[in-house]
């Protein structure tokens, strides 16, 4: 199974920036889509940003123009640059990957989550 390890969360003031990283390790033949989701207590996990292996991206309307997702396929790592942060961005952010360990079946895995807190 592939492990996804996130880093980069923390506490920041409104208007500040953070950069999240998520590195995939384990038996990996190919990683298709990678993405970032977030969740606050009592709410469903929601998509923040998504990127395909070819670099096509998709963002939640609430983060468009402020967040940028990117990936380094050679390092099996996805990043989320978060600028102009708002208190409503406060959440646990989870990395997500759609991968194939041997080039046959595809699987989905999640990271353990990293807390992002934006103070007003």
Image (cartoon, rainbow, N blue to C red):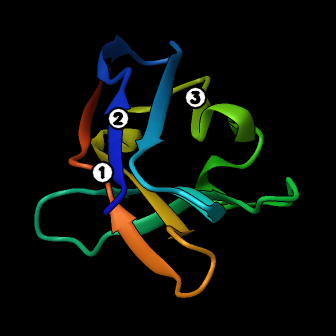
Kindly report the distance in space between the C-alpha atoms of the residues bearing marks 2 and 3. Answer: 15 Å
Could you tell me if residue 93 is visible in this image? yes
Label 1, residues with CA under 10 Å away: few <14, some 14-19, many ≥20? some
The residue under the point 32% across, 69% down is 45
Give the residue at x 47% y 28%.
Answer: 20
Between 44 and 62, the residue placed more toward the observer is 44
Residue 60 visible within the image: no
Could you tell me which secondary element the residue under label 3 belongs to? strand
Instruction: Answer with the quarter of the image where residue 35 lies.
Output: bottom right
Residue 37: image quadrant is: bottom left
Work out which residue is located at the far left of the displayed protein and give it: 42
Quadrant where the C terminus is found in the figure = top left
Q: Position of residue 18 (x, y in %)?
A: 49, 18
Q: Which residue is drawn at 36% across and 46% down?
A: 4
Determine which residue is flagged by label 3: 82
CB under 8 Å between discs 1 and 2: yes
User: Is tag 1's residue or tag 2's residue first in the polypeptide sequence?
Assistant: 2
**Between disc 1 and disc 3, whose residue precedes?**
3
2 vs 3, front mark: 2
Q: Determine the secondary structure under disc 2.
A: strand
Circle 2 residue: 6
Q: State whether residue 16 is above or below residue 109.
A: above
């Amino acid at each position: 199974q592939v492990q996804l390890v996130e880093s980069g969360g923390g506490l920041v003031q409104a208007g500040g920036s953070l950069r999240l990283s998520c590195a995939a390790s384990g038996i990996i033949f190919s990683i298709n889509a990678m993405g970032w989701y977030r969740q606050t207590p009592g709410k469903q996990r929601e998509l923040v940003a998504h990127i395909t292996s070819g670099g096509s991206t998709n963002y939640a309307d609430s983060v468009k123009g402020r967040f940028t997702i990117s990936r380094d396929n050679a390092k099996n790592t996805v990043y989320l640059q978060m600028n102009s942060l708002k208190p409503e961005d406060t959440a646990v952010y989870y990395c997500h990957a759609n991968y194939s360990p041997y080039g046959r079946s595809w699987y989905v895995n999640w990271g353990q989550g990293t807390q992002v807190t934006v103070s007003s």
